[in-house]
Image (cartoon, helix red, strand yellow):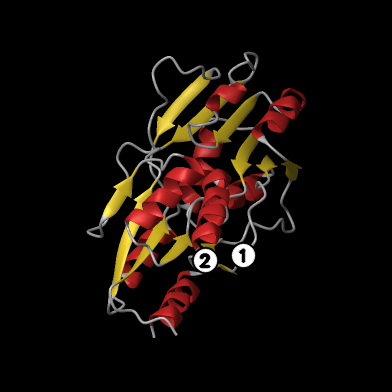
Amino acid sequence: MITAKHKRVLILGGIGDSLKLTALASSIPGLEVINSLAGRTRQPVVTSTPTRIGPFGGVSGLRNYLREQKIDFLIDATHPFASQISWNAAIATSELNIPRLMFVRPPWKKIEGDRWLEVESNKAATRVLPELASRIFLSIGRQELVSYAHLKDLWFLMRMIEPPQPRTPVPPGKILTERGPFSLEEERSLLQKYEIEAVVSKNSGGDATYPKIIAARELGILVVMIQRPSLPGGEQVSDVESAVSWLRNYSN
């Protein structure tokens, strides 16, 4: 069994739970934790744990970083839609024979009362929206706004943590810059205030943004649900406690 003395774990963050995971992992005796964030948010939420911000530069860049920093384990706790870094991590850790764990929170499941139209991508969503609604809550972040910019005859309520970069093409409508989580009451009020007829959402899973799905259900509003991209295989867990247990097993 691998000992924990002077061992290092790299946590690829991206979801809210990764902060809790980082804090708990830092409490494991003899284990040094390095947190990594993609840097898409200019003011990310960070902890006192050593944090690296920014891209690695593909598989080769990540492989070099893992080797140079003498990383012993890697936990991929990135957003389920940030699939490229997950594939890069799978390849790099395999080449270096570094144990890798994927922390993948379960996707939301459609239940009674939900009106969902499941599509495979943002591009697919743009093809169906003109026939579905004229006032749309676009809850996908700022990275994919350009995909909707050509829909000039529709009105969009766009919510994101930070505004899009200057000169980024965006669809017509209103931009809200807010950081969740949001309560059910807040989401219900938002949909009613702006007379939203359809919601576009990634199936990110988790509790932080699920209230908008509940609010849409209660109000009978259609949700165009973008499905997750494919992820690499490998050992997976769906909660923080299981990820910490995985680390402890390697630390004993």
Q: Of callouts 2 and 1, which one flags the residue occurring earlier in the amino acid sequence?
A: 2
Q: Position of residue 41 (x, y in %)?
A: 37, 38
What residue is shown at x 38% (from left), y 43% (from top)?
179
Q: Are marks 2 and 1 in contact (CB under 8 Å)?
A: yes
Q: Quadrant of the N terminus?
A: bottom left
Horizontal placement of 27 versus 215: left or right?
left
Report the front residue among 152 and 52: 52
Would you name the residue on which mark 2 appears? 101
Q: Secondary structure at mark 1?
A: loop
Horizontal placement of 117 versus 211: left or right?
right
* Above or below 100: residue 229: above
Q: Position of residue 22 (x, y in %)?
A: 35, 64
The local crowd at label 2, few if under 14, some if 14 to 19, many if 20 or more residues have their Cα within 10 Å, is: many
Q: Position of residue 46 (x, y in %)?
A: 28, 52
- Spatial CA distance of label 2 from label 1 is 7 Å
- What kind of residue is marked 2? Leu
The local crowd at label 1, few if under 14, some if 14 to 19, many if 20 or more residues have their Cα within 10 Å, is: few
Res 221 seen here:
no
Q: Quadrant of the C terminus?
A: bottom left
Q: Position of residue 12 (x, y in %)?
A: 43, 55
What residue is shown at x 56% (from left), y 25% (from top)?
156
- What number is the disc on residue 199? none
* Above or below 150: residue 3: below
Report the front residue among 140 and 250: 250
Would you name the residue on which mark 1 appears? 234
Res 21 seen here:
yes
- What kind of residue is marked 1? Gly
